[in-house]
Image (tube, grey):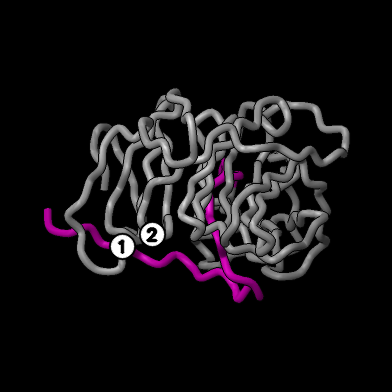
Amino acid sequence: EGEPALELVCGVGPLGHWVMDAAFLPTPEGSVARVALALSNNSVTIVDVDGSAGEARTAAVFECARTYLLYSARLFCSEQEDRVFVAAGTIFNSVLVWSFPLSATEGGDGTICGGQVTPCPPRCSLAGHQGSILKLCWSRDGRRLASCSDDRTARVWDLGPTAAAGAPHDGVCASLEAEKVIYGHDGRLWDCLFSDDSKTLVTASEDCTCRFWSLSRARSAETDTSDLVATVGGHRGRGVWRIAATGDHLF
């Protein structure tokens, strides 16, 4: 009855870099939670939270071999394939995809910022945007990635065996082209979201609309918007910044 109460278990940091994304990982015995924090220097810090002591400690630190600064990042954890994938939207308008083994997060040195950093090679590079990459989104199965930018486009990338969970990696960074380029908003794109079946992409924009795009319909030209399924409007102000979905409802 009444509003649920939230209790702060502990604080984490300072980390020295902006936190671009966070994801819960399988929790080890003796911890309340294990959290992966994607940072703006293209690294990921794994933190174990001890609720009884009210403390957090570093379990591991991973860093992409290309230490670019980031405007955005998104994590995808595959327990089945024992990997954590990182999509990193760099300041060079490209996306780097890299990964590390989920099992490699075991360990820890008891500090929040210290410890040995494990370098990780990039698995693929995604180029094509002409502006800053403001948001990234993984499909549910981790085989597709969507990016949206202040160039007013969203791009969908089919990572296939190049970076999908369980794929072999020979140390070569592959360059991939977008499977689909979506143009049609009247402002910058702030967010994007796959449907559960990955057949539709929802985009949120500075133009105060959310738009639903069919990923199965091909475009004959950049200005062709026949793949636009629906437009949701009504907001006023500086745009729609974030979207979330549960079941058949979009927020």
What residue span does the magenta drawing correspond to? 1-29
- Above or below 141: residue 11: below
Q: Are discs 1 and 2 less than 8 Å apart at CB? A: yes
Number of the label disc, if any, that sits on residue 239: 1
On screen, residue 123 above or below 43:
above
**Horizontal and vertical percent position of residue 47:** 62, 58
Residue 117 covered by magenta stretch: no
The type of residue carrying mark 2 is Gly
Residue drawn at (53%, 42%), measured in percent from left and top?
Answer: 155
Q: Which amino acid type is marked by label 1?
A: Gly
Residue 85: image quadrant is top right
Q: Would residue 171 be found to the left or right of residue 175 on screen?
A: right
Q: Earlier in the sequence, mark 1 or mark 2?
A: 2
Is 9 inside the magenta-drawn segment?
yes
The residue positioned 69% from the left and 40% from the top of the image is 102
Q: Is residue 82 left or right of residue 243?
A: right
Residue to which mark 2 is pinned: 187
* Secondary structure, magenta segment, majority class: loop
